[in-house]
């Protein structure tokens, strides 16, 4: 049995990583709490892929609230694919986006359960931001209906940096 098969989380540690890719582990909210201080302190990290880790609303809220207040966070790409997140995650994510949009360029929240309420909260935060640099927003497979689509269209009409919406 290899080390990767025995250990639920295997992390390569380097002095200043540009990317964190721990997708498809079972970190949960406890793992999020353990990782967040390292993520916040790593000024060179630009990509954070924690998809399919069952972080839940609690884990993602810990991450977004901590990084929202971090002067060193420069993460440009977020991947929350398949976390089974509902509209309640939209508020901490929107609060994070509203103060860090100078660096966030790609947000993938596809294959979740945001619905119209979550899509509206996220899109309103991007639309109201004066400094957003988001280029890609993936909301696909989130049970979004007409009200959510209206929010997406309103956001897309004013966010000049946006090049792709799914």
Image: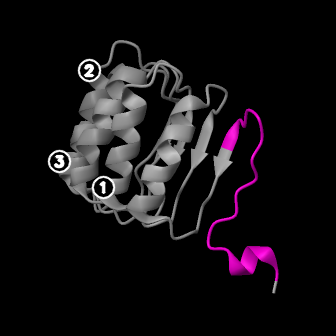
**Helix or strand or loop: what does disc 2 sit on?**
helix
Q: In the rendered image, which residue does mark 1 sit on?
A: 58
Residue 70 picture quarter: top left
x and y percentages locating residue 92 in the rendered image: 28, 40
What segment is highlighted magenta in the picture? Answer: 2-19
Q: Residues within 10 Å of mark 2 (few under 14, many from 20)?
A: few
Q: Nearer the viewer, mark 2 or mark 3?
A: 2
What label sits on residue 16 in the rendered view?
none
Residue 98 picture quarter: top left
Asked if disc 2 and disc 1 are in contact, CB closer than 8 Å, the reply is no
Residue positioned 26% across, 20% down in the render = 128
Q: Is residue 151 visible?
A: yes
Q: In the rendered image, which residue does mark 2 sit on?
A: 128
Distance from disc 3 to disc 1, alpha carbons, whole Å, reads 26 Å
N-terminal of the pair, mark 2 or mark 3, is: 2
x and y percentages locating residue 111 in the rendered image: 42, 63
What label sits on residue 147 in the rendered view?
3
* Color scheme of the displayed model: one colour
């Amino acid at each position: 049995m290899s080390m990767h098969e025995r250990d639920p989380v295997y992390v390569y540690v380097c002095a200043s990583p540009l990317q964190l890719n721990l997708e498809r582990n079972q970190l949960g909210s406890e793992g999020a709490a353990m990782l967040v201080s390292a993520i916040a302190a790593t000024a060179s990290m630009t990509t954070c892929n924690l998809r399919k880790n069952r972080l839940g609303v609690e884990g993602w809220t810990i991450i977004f609230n901590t990084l929202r207040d971090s002067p060193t966070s420069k993460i440009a790409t977020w991947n929350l694919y398949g976390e089974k997140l509902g509209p309640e995650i939209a508020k901490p994510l929107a609060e994070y986006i509203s103060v860090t949009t100078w660096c966030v360029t790609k947000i993938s929240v596809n294959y979740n359960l945001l619905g119209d309420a979550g899509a509206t909260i996220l899109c309103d935060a991007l639309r109201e931001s004066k400094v957003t640099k988001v280029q890609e927003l993936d909301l696909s497979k989130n049970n979004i209906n007409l009200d959510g689509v209206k929010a997406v269209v309103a956001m897309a009409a004013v966010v000049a940096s946006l090049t792709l919406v799914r």
